């Protein structure tokens, strides 16, 4: 084996720990939903690339809808 399984296990534990630190910093719906979308999609499709792509779509959809809602709210206060 090129890399011993014990080393791979330590690397996996380290990456898992880093992900928990990232998850601790997430705040609100707009940050949690894309992160969970990436995790669930990657888990079920066994493809992190598919998880990333769907997570990006969800992120930019939420961002666009929020901007649209803010623009409509702003337009309503001007009238």
Image (cartoon, helix red, strand yellow):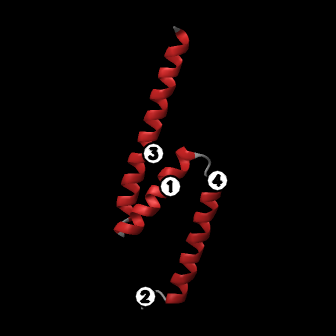
Instruction: Identify the residue at image location x=58%, y=76%.
Output: 13
Q: Nearer the viewer, mark 4 or mark 2?
A: 4
Q: Residues within 10 Å of mark 2 (few under 14, many from 20)?
A: few
Number of numbered discs overlaid on the protein picture: 4
Gap between marks 1 and 3 measured at Cα: 9 Å
Measure the alpha-carbon separation of dots 3 and 2: 38 Å
The residue sitting at 53% across, 44% down in the picture is 30
Which structural element holds mark 3?
Answer: helix
From the viewer's perspective, is 49 left or right of 22?
Answer: left
Of the two numbered discs 4 and 2 on the same chain, state the one appearing first in sequence. Answer: 2
Q: Is residue 39 above or below residue 72?
A: below
Nearest to the observer: residue 24 or residue 7: 24
SS at mark 2 in the image: loop
Q: Name the residue at 39% across, 59% down.
A: 51
Chain-order first, disc 4 or disc 3: 4
Mark whose residue sits in front, 3 or 2: 3
Pointer 2 with pointer 1, Cβ within 8 A: no
Of labels 2 and 1, earlier in sequence is: 2
**Horizontal arrangement in the rendering, residue 24 relative to residue 51 (left or right):** right
Q: Position of residue 40 (x, y in %)?
A: 44, 62
Q: Mark 1 = which residue?
A: 35
Q: Please tell me which of labels 4 and 1 falls first in the chain.
A: 4
**Point 49% across, 89% down: residue:** 4
Pointers 4 and 3 in contact (C-beta within 8 Å) = no
Residue to which mark 4 is pinned: 25
Residue 57 drawn at (x, y percent): 38, 46
Contact (Cβ within 8 Å) of mark 1 with mark 3: no
Q: Quadrant of residue 21?
A: bottom right
Residue hosting label 2 = 2
Quick one: 24 or 4, which is closer to the camera? Answer: 24
Q: Which residue is mark 3?
A: 59
């Amino acid at each position: 084996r090129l890399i011993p399984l014990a080393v791979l296990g330590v690397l996996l534990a380290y990456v898992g720990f880093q992900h928990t630190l990232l998850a601790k910093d997430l705040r609100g719906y707009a940050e949690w939903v894309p992160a969970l979308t990436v995790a669930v999609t990657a888990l079920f499709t066994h493809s992190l690339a598919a998880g990333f792509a769907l997570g990006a779509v969800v992120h930019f959809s939420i961002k666009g809808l929020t901007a649209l809602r803010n623009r409509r709210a702003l337009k309503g206060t001007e009238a």
